[in-house]
Image (spheres, rainbow, N blue to C red):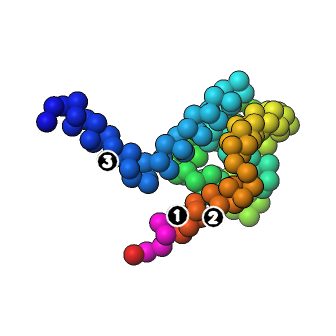
Amino acid sequence: MSSKAESARIEAEIAARLGQSIKRAEQALIARKSQALRPFDLTVPQYAALMVLSYAPGLSGAQLARACMVTPQTMATVLGNLKTKGLIRRDPSSVHKKVLVTELTRTGRAVLSEADAAARAVEDRLSAEFDREDQEQLRSLLERAIKVLSSEG
C-alpha cells in the first residue's frame, strides 16, 4: 500500500472517532473566541476568569480554577496577567489571610463588557446555525456524553 493511501486510511479512521469531532468543535470555538478577544488583549482563559468574577466576586484562585476548568497553576498565571493589566485586584481574605480573594476593577468591568459582546457574537453565530430544537438536542447529547465520561466504569 502506498504511503498516500495509508495516510488517507489513518485520517479516515481518526475522523470516524466521536472524540475527534468533539475536539475539533471545541478547537474551532476556542480559535474563534481567541480571535474575537484579541482586540481586548485577552485570552479565552482570562475572559473566562473575568466572566466568573463578574457573577461571583471574591473567589479565591482555587475556586476560579475549578469554575474555569483549568489547573490552579494555569489560574495563577491568568490572575497574574489580569492583575498586571489592572483588570482585577487581589486582597487577603477576611476569613483566611493566606487566601487572596479576587474582584474586578472598574477597568476590568469595562473591558469585560466589550469583550463579552465580542465573545457572545461568536456564540450567537454558532447558535444561529441551529434552531431551538436542534440546540436543545445538542445540549442534551453533550450532557449525556459528559455524564457517561464522568461516571466510573
Q: Is residue 80 left or right of residue 146?
A: right
Picture residue at 57% right of the left edge, 34% below the top? 31
Within 10 Å of the Cα at label 1, are there few (<14), some (14-19), or many (20+) other Cα atoms? Answer: few
Q: Which element type, helix, strand or loop, lies under badge 1?
A: helix
Picture residue at 73% right of the left edge, 51% below the top? 131
| Mark 2 lies on residue | 140
Residue 34, position as x, y percentages in the image: 62, 32
Residue 60, position as x, y percentages in the image: 67, 55
Q: Is residue 129 left or right of residue 111?
A: left
Residue 147, position as x, y percentages in the image: 54, 69
- The alpha-carbon separation of the residues under discs 3 and 2 comes to 26 Å
Q: Which element type, helix, strand or loop, lies under badge 3?
A: helix
Q: Amino acid at mark 2?
A: Ser
| Mark 3 lies on residue | 13
Magenta part mainly helix, strand or loop?
A: helix
Looking at the rendering, in which quadrant would you find the C terminus?
bottom left
Is residue 55 positioned above or below 40 on the image?
below
Q: Amino acid at mark 1?
A: Ala
Which quadrant of the structure image shows residue 59?
A: bottom right
